[in-house]
Every structure is written in structure tokens, then in C-alpha cells.
Image (spheres, grey):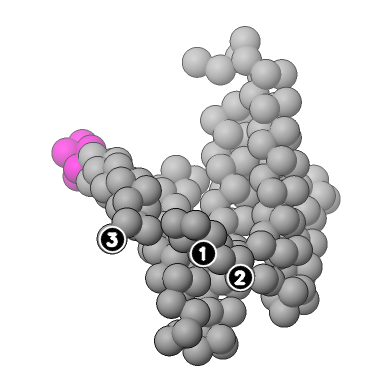
Amino acid sequence: MLHYKLQIGCLVILCYVAFVYLREVRLYRQKLKKTYFGELLMLAIVSLVLDMATVYTVNHLETVPGWVNAVLHALFLSSIDAVIFFFCLYILKTAGSLPRTTWKRVVLATPFVINEVILFACMGQLEYRIGETTNYSMGIPAYTCFVVAFIYIMIANVKFVHKWKYIE
């Protein structure tokens, strides 16, 4: 239980936000449609559940088969990238800066796609380190998540600041 305290706290908060979001949709009798916020919220919950699964597998390396650990880590790291990408899309949509042309959408998605290719190509280089309180994974697949997070957070911040005076 010690290893999951942060994830449980985050999951409680995300489930509460999802509950309030769905309640408001129902309260105003709106049809539940796809929105960047709704998709981001559901993706974040899935990512958090995958995080909990990888926390378990990385702290039970002697009992969990290596392939299960690798598959769960690949799914988890990929879900983190997707959350970051959808976060950027949500900010761009909010700021009115979502690309309209196919070419600009391809350019926006390129770091995500490249990162996914690198992530799956380098999964064999993921290392599991033994820490004092918990074990963790490190390696190229994890490092590329930091890079893609930096890229998309910078894009979102630049666009948001650029459109600041136009946002209601």
C-alpha cells in the first residue's frame, strides 16, 4: 500500500472530477459528446491505473514475468505521451489555436509519433532500478517521455500566452 499512496490520491481526485463532469452533462441534459477535456480525463484515469500496475510489477520483479512488466510499461509510457499530447490539444482548443490544416496537424503530431516509435523500438533498454523505498524504471523510453512533455508544454504555453487577450 505504501507504493500506491500518490496514485490512489490522484485517482480519487480524477474520479471526483469525472463524476462532477458527467453530473453536469446530465444535469444540463446535454448529449455526452466527444470533447478534448472528456477524452483527456478518461485517458488520464487509464494512465493512472496503468501507473499503479507498473508500480506493482516493478516492485515484484521476482514474481512478475518480464514480458508482463515490459508490456505494462510500454502501455503506461505510451499513455503518458497520449495524456501530454491531449493536454496540448485541449489548451490549443481553449486558446482557439487548434491547427485547421492537415499539414499543421501532422506537424503538431510529429513529436508524439516519433516518440512512440522510439519508445517501442527501445523498450528493451528500459532498466529497473532498486530504490530505498520503491523500485523504478529508467532508460530511453522513460527519458523520451520527458522530452515530449517539454515540447508539448512549451507549444501549449507559447500558444496560450500568444492568445491570452482573446481568451474569455
Residue that mark 3 sits on: 1
- In the image, residue 148 lies in the stretch drawn in magenta: no
Assess whether mark 2 and mark 1 are in contact (beta carbons under 8 angstroms): yes
Quarter that holds the N terminus:
bottom left
> In this orientation, does residue 120 appear?
no
Label 2 element class: strand
Label 3 element class: loop
Q: Is residue 50 left or right of residue 32?
A: right
Residue that mark 1 sits on: 135
Splitting the image into 4 quarters, where does residue 123 fall? bottom right
Q: Is residue 29 left or right of residue 136?
A: left
Residue sitting nearer the eye, 97 or 116: 116
How many numbered marks does the figure carry?
3
Q: CA separation, marks 3 and 2?
A: 20 Å
First reached walking from the N terminus: tag 1 or tag 3: 3
Where is residue 142 shown, x and y percent of the image? 67, 60
Residue at (73% x, 35% y) in the render: 155
Q: Main secondary structure of the magenta part?
A: helix
Q: CA separation, marks 1 and 3?
A: 14 Å
Q: Is residue 64 above or below residue 92?
A: below
Which portion, as a residue range, is magenta?
23-28
Residue that mark 2 sits on: 128
Residue sitting nearer the eye, 85 or 22: 85
Where is residue 83 shown, x and y percent of the image? 54, 52
Residue at (59% x, 48% y) in the render: 84
Please name the amino acid that badge 2 sits on.
Tyr
Residue at (68% x, 71% y) in the render: 126
Residue at (44% x, 57% y) in the render: 133
Where is residue 60 shown, x and y percent of the image? 43, 77
Report crowding for label 3: few under 14, some 14 to 19, many 20 or more residues within 10 A (C-alpha): few
- In the image, residue 27 lies in the stretch drawn in magenta: yes
Q: Tell which residue pokes out farthest to the front in this image.
A: 132
